Image: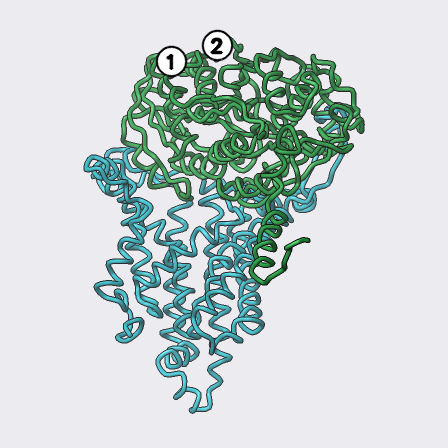
Amino acid sequence: MDAIFLQILNGLDKGSAYALIALGLTLIFGTLGVVNFAHGALFMIGAFVAVTLSKVLAISKVVLDPERLDFLGNPAKIKTPYVIEWFGSFGEWMIDYTIPLSLLLTIPIMIIIGVVMERGLIRHFYKRPHADQILVTFGLAIVLQELIKIFFGSEAVPMQTPDTFTGALDIGIWFGFNPGSVIYPYWRLVYFFFAAVVIGGVFSFLRFTTFGMVVRAGMADRETVGLLGINIDKKFTIMFGVAAAVAGTAGAMYTGVNQPVFHMGMDFLVLSFVVVVVGGMGSLPGAVAAGFLLGVLESFASMPGVKNAFEAIGLPSIDQIIIYLVAVIILLVRPRGLMGKVGVMEE
Amino acid sequence: MSNFKVNRRGLLKSGAVIGAGVAMPTIFTASSAAAYTNEPTGGTVTLGFNVPQTGAYADEGADELRAYQLAVQHLNGEGDGGMMNTFSSSELQGNGILGKQVVFVTGDTQTKSDAARASAQSMIQKDGAVMITGGSSSGVAIAVQGLCQEAGVIFMAGLTHSNDTTGKDKKANGFRHFFNGYMSAAALAPVLEARYGSDRNAYHLTADYTWGWTQQESIAAATEAVGWNTVANVLTPLTATDFSSYIAPVLNSGADVLVLNHYGGNMINSLTSAVQFGLRDKMVNGKQFEIVVPLYSRLMARGAGENVKGILGSTNWHWSLQDEGSKAFVQSFGQAYGFPPSQAAHTVYCQTLLYADACQRAGTFNPCGIAEALEGFDFDGLGNGPTHYRGSDHQCFKDVLVVQGKENPTSEFDLLEVVEVTPRAQVEYAVDHPMFAGGALGSCNDGS
């Protein structure tokens, strides 16, 4: 039972990342009708905004220590970050909290990137077939990925979570399990709650603000909203920026879960696209529900018991294909997805 | 009187025959003119460096390329000579190989077997490379080794750790300086027993490809031989990025050791997840839970950050070694690039020197002559102590380093510390050992 509970937690945690990326992906499809294959790259750029901040905070004053030698036998360089030199313990706190602090930079940077991407490139493809949109956005994703690799290298960049959130919580005792049987990392719990807050924020923004009401109206009937004299294109451009910010913040916070690497966006992109398809193209609740659902299914499929059961009957384990298997079944049985609009993807 | 007539049909036939002759790749025609594939005829000899320049192992590939460039400089008499000054063989004089200046071409393996074969083939056919070397993956090494065997050139493997490279997939034209999964296990097991005792339950997470399988088989056998019990072995896809769902079941499995048969990004992510789940702070069966990473690299340890502290593993070579060869190489590489070399850089540098030396001793670039010179060759001064290139499987035998993530690193490079140098005799095995069984070395192919 404790193993199942753990995998549910894992699934919700994995699903958080899927849901956050899929939310932006489906938001862009729902508003602009564009299949944005560069969305994973936005997740990756968000992560590297956090990396950049960590590198900036690590810029150090260098003093040569003649008593210690480096690997070539020269005096060793002793580095002290300037933020610690200037601000003392506050500087140490800034370095410790680099990942959460990076959100302050990530949000505006990602909104700008999103708006520039939409105005500079993607708007030229609105009236082109989806295949063209996929090709250009996928090409853009590759370019962005390679640029990040040029600047940060191909190896993972180590990032540390704040000391307060390092380690794991014995969450099982809250639910009646034996002590030590259900342990879960603090930062993964933080990530789950962060995802819940962001998803709640986006839904509230669309539901309870005038801007959100106009966007929803535009998603339902763009032409009519335009005829009412509302500049719906401008609002959709802003929504593209919001979607980029959601992906970017998801990426920045994810650096505490896994060490960021240049191809992390691609790793998530295809999975998130499948999540959108399963949830229903353009359906925000569908994307979120499918994200968590597929995350949980993937976690269960990774359990040794499940893998062994498949191997016992001569089949390969399904942990890496479960998501695609579900997508195939959904597309066959309900082409519009779990919560998709009637008619979308059904013709 | 001649009856020679030119008609349309005859002209077309002749044109087709001549055209086909002109268009035929030189690799098929060279054998008639040259004694072996890509026999150097001018003042230069071309080596082909096939390394990952893009993809997940591009940093490792870049380090290999730096070492290759350094080796070429040294062979041509430039720079400080590096390990040529400490190499026990004195054949290399800094005047190229057999008096020919060494030039090189590079290919990008992308860490994909098909791409690696394509780039190796291009270097052989278009650039006239007489030897191919490099790589950071066993799958790639095995694929390129097979190609070189068919093409009739020597393959000096780079970073490849699977038993299969010199086991069931060994080839007469292929040579490996790097150690393998069996050797890692044979070196690690006694240290693990000394540190953690003989009553341990190990849970293995294994990358689902040739290297992972042979590494797991080796470390499981070696640890079981010292009394450990293998609780489970879970294969993880090479493409996995989040290992939390594989780590979580470890918590209640009864295991008190987690063995991560992962490399590169897999290792960084699985180790990070394991540490996040508090495994290192956990007590199981009254014992401290431990994590083991059988194959380490410094570049990988850097990616894993503080998570590597205190964790045991093995490595082929480390820049902190104090023998004359290692010091000379670190000095030479460090002066050129500003940081110490990785084990990948070391092994490819050694392979280049070993190839050049074999050419000198054989007095030819003929792959069969070189193979004969390398088989059974004993040497020293290249950083691993006395080393033997075994003739029956083309595997190098030398001391193996057991390393541990350093608790208090003094620099960004100072991540691993050598805790034991396992003597060569302890990691040697018979050529027909079951883990290396199957396949045959075959006979050398010079392409003629």
Q: Which residue is mark 2?
A: B426
Quadrant location of the C terminus of chain B? Answer: top right
Q: Are marks 1 and 2 in contact (CB under 8 Å)?
A: no
Q: Colour of chain B?
A: green
Decide: few, some or many residues near mark 2? Use Cα within 10 Å; few <14, some 14-19, many ≥20: few
Q: Colour of chain A?
A: cyan
Asked if residue A128 can be seen in this view, the reply is yes
Residue at disc 2, secondary structure: helix
Label 1 and label 2: CA atoms lie apart by 19 Å
Query: Which residue is situated farthest in the top direction here?
Result: B425
Residue A171 place in picture, x, y as percent: 31, 41
Query: Foreground: B30 or B138?
Result: B30
Q: Amino acid at mark 1?
A: Gly
Q: Amino acid at mark 2?
A: Gln
Q: Is residue B230 above or below residue B69?
A: above
Query: Which residue is situated farthest in the front direction here?
Result: B1
Q: Is residue B131 above or below residue A287?
A: above
